Image (tube, helix red, strand yellow):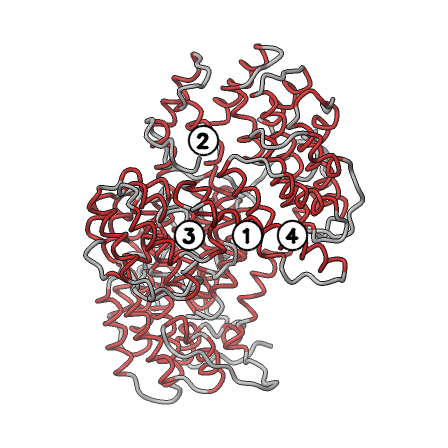
Amino acid sequence: MSRAELPDEDIYRACITWNVPAVADSEREDVRLFLAAIRLNAGALDPSREEAVPARMSPLRRAAEGLRSELGGDEATAKQHYKMVARHAGVRGLLGLLMLAWMADATAADFRRVEFRLNQLEGRGVRDLVARCHCKLATWATDHGWLEVATHHYDEAHRHAGGELRRVLDGVGNWFGRTQSFTLGSRKDSDMTRFPWIMDRADNAARREIDDQFKRSFRSPWTRTITLGGASAVEGVDIQSAELQASWAGAVWLMPAIHRLHAALILGNSRTPVDVARGIGLWVRGGGSQIGNLIDSSEAYLTKESVADLLTVQLRGGRNVFGRERWLEACQTLWDEMPDELVDSLLANSRLPSIATGYGLEATELYLHAALLNRSPAMLERSLDSDDASIALLARCLSPSLVEALPLRVIGRMLSAVVTTASGPHEDWKSRGWSVLPRLWRAAGNEQDLRDRLLALMPHGSVPEAAVSVPEFVPNSLIDSSLQAAIERIYQDIADADRGRYAGHASQPAWNVARLLFATERHDSTAIAALVEMASSGRVLAEQRLASLNALRLLAEHGLLDAADVEGALSARKIASFMTDDLSADQRLDDISRIALRARFGPVFDLDAELLAASRDPDTRVRKLAVDSISWLSRQAFASAARDAALLGALYDPHPRVQAAALPALWRGDFASESVRRVAHGRVEELWPEAHRDLRLAVAREISRTDSVRGDQDAKLQEFAQVDRSWLVREYAKGSGSAFGD
């Protein structure tokens, strides 16, 4: 026995508020078709459906037909249907106005028409209906990037809402620039805020993906598979349905979780540029974490067009992203691949802060602004119109490589701002920028008085950074005292570790020792002994031990120590502290770090077998360090068949940093077999269309070097690099980027 039908008015309200249980058992055809269309049920949207569309339809049936046309790509027909529905009075006409406002090409006028109709409604339950319609408009305005419109409708929704709806709106107030608040206690959300009929479809999508991934994990590589489903095969209809339903319901509080799941389904199943950009956009909009890592891991699958689509269309220039920090993180990761118009827009519309902590949004804005100035020198001149405090902060954020190209007037203005605002920077900033400020001083003419004023500002802990940037900037007395302090810190860290204390591990004394010795090109047996002691300790943190081994390797590469100096650090040892949950991988990383140090002494040690094995290790860190070492040996004219094989194999590695580590040897190293080098060059050319920026940048660096080995294949690679989507790659390919990042 079927339930009694709701009154017509209540049916329209239920369809508008997406109260599916209230109408789920309805026998009315128009209700069933409307529910099926928004749920994306296959039968309702099948373009081959032969059922004739009647000339006379209820407004609800016409709305369903309009949505079917819209999803099929016929927006003009859809709009005609919606306009006919909108001519009706009351909630029937409201349905048509809402459908028009929901369209991708909706305008602010469409939103105003909905609001005008809402203000005319009267009767039972109107406040909840009005609140939920404003939730819809806030959700859709956010999609368009209309921040002020979205905030207005959020405020109206909050004003009319009551009970559980008001409570969930309180929880997302910060997304709209309002106060976020939560209600403590064990109150259970109602179905009309949890929308279980929506989340069930999302859960189905997640369960299906987990099942498919598990099956793929044990599928035989010789199994032939065929995927059915056409355009919906990438992420499936379930998640699309959940997202469409949540949007129609105006459940803005559910959208981020659905967006993140949608992103995971897309990126887990597709590597096409359009899908990758779509997945990244959904992840950013969904409040996903580690946005920079996600973009970097997917960068190889982007194109110039998909980057532009991601930043300007999907993310609306940051206007539809909840949390500006997420937009800035995306921009920082893609600063060199942004469309020129977006670069100019960001620079023109950003205001440099005069006071900023080292880790807040202001700091992120400053670093992004400074990076973008690499691409727009004209905007750098405009930045000088800011106040001294802002310019001083900007100077500390510049890329050191930009300094050489700056006009003297700009350099002078920046240095003047820095010394004028000596007491101005937040404490976090006083140790920032000491790789840049000495270069500005050198470019300005090495004035003694100016150096003294800058040195008076420099914290003692920044001496190594300044010394390695411009050695002549730092007096020998400061270098000596800084070196002594770093040595003492190393022995203090070792003593602390023996007592089970790890308070000073963040100070990086090992790297400070290496930088100071490298800057002064000196051999200091006392400092080297301290590094060896740290590298040989079984009780210090893994990060401290590896930093010492890396520092020793750097000094060995530049001839500042020999094998006898580091004998105590060369032999493998069982480690007691680890960096990750994979204890075996951490042990292998420690082992290869010692092998890599031995490799810096050339053929004194026979390491081919160990390096070749490590270049195939399951841990990326181990493979990268092994290939780095093999490439270095090749560049020192130590060639062997095993090293040839490892270098060629690295170009088939799944990680771009391992691939890039092999490249210097292809141009500047020795190979036992030139035929292997030719095959390796061919592999680079084969990789290029889907190569990561790390690899493309490494190639551009090599072909721009005057001491690189030239070949016929260089011309084609240079051609690729000169039109690359990355500004950095293009600059190197032109021969004007030699300072960047070296």
Residue type beneath disc 1: Ala
Measured Cα–Cα span from mark 2 to mark 4: 38 Å
Q: Mark 2 sits on what residue?
A: 696
How far is mark 1 from mark 2, CA to CA? 27 Å
Residue at numbered disc 1? 264
Sequence-wise first label, 1 or 4: 1
**For the residues marked 2 and 3, what is the alpha-carbon distance in whole angstroms?**
20 Å
Looking at the image, tell me whether mark 4 or mark 3 is earlier in sequence order. 3
* Tag 1 and tag 2, C-beta contact below 8 Å: no
Horizontal side of 475 relative to 592 (left or right) equals left
Residue 128: x and y in percent read 40, 83
Residue positioned 57% across, 45% down in the render? 513
Cα distance between the residues tagged 4 and 3 = 37 Å
Q: Position of residue 104 (x, y in %)?
A: 32, 57
The total number of labels drawn is: 4
Q: Amino acid at mark 2?
A: Arg
Q: Which residue is denoted by mark 3 in the rendering? A: 330
Q: Quadrant of the C terminus?
A: top left
Determine the secondary structure under disc 4: helix
Crowd around label 4: few <14 · some 14–19 · many ≥20 (10 Å): many
Q: Position of residue 71 (x, y in %)?
A: 39, 53
Q: Residue furthest front?
A: 477
Task: Tell me the kind of residue under disc 3.
Answer: Ala
Depth order, front residue of 640/602:
602
